[in-house]
Amino acid sequence: MNAMKPKKQKTPKHLIWSYRNLLLVFISVAVLTQSVWGLETAQVMNEAAQGDENAAYFLGVMYKTGSGVSPDCDKALKWTEKAALQGHTLAQSHLGMMYSKGCGESVTRNLFKAYYWTALAAKQGLQFARENLKKLKGQLHPYLVEEAQQKVVDFKPNK
């Protein structure tokens, strides 16, 4: 007589892709930040000030995490937004996260801005931004969702 074997449950494909994309982002951030943090902080600051979107993004990450500089949410917001306005997908997603949670005492929670920046990253194909967008959509009035989506359509990167 065959003993009943428990069914092995498979992980849903959408979760596998979400985790995969999130892992790829963290790996790319780790690899790229290693190369950036290998440089002098002053050099990263200089390149960011000259308009390099990657340097601006990583300078924002450095200020957010306190890596190589003192943690400062205002400066993290400034540099992350500068990169996001240039069309940097990860910066847009991180800016959305900063606004969805707030950052310290200086950056207040703003779900409209969180939705807007996350929607820009999702539009560029960032899977975990798409997942976050679904969560944010349920927290906003439909009118505000529509307004944010129109801003996404009208967005032109500053390159």
Image (cartoon, helix red, strand yellow):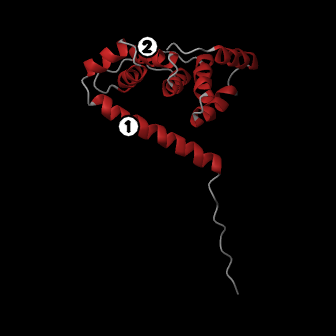
- Residue ID for mark 1: 30
Q: Residue at x 57, y 36 (%)?
A: 128
Q: Secondary structure at mark 1?
A: helix
In the image: residue 144, left or right of residue 30: right
Q: Left of 67 or right of it: where is 116? A: right
On screen, residue 48 above or below 2: above
Q: Looking at the image, is mark 2 or mark 1 earlier in the sequence? A: 1
Image location (x, y in percent) of residue 28 = 42, 37
Q: How many marks?
A: 2
Q: List x then y, in percent, for residue 105.
A: 44, 15
**Residue at the image point whose x is 41% and y is 24% from the top:** 54
Q: Mark 2 — residue?
A: 78
Report which quarter residue 37 is drawn in. top left
The residue depicted at 50 percent of the width and 26 percent of the height is: 94
Residue at image position (54%, 45%) is: 19
Give the image location of residue 18, x and y in percent: 58, 42
How crowded is the residue under tag 1: few (<14 C-alpha within 10 Å), some, or many (20+)? few
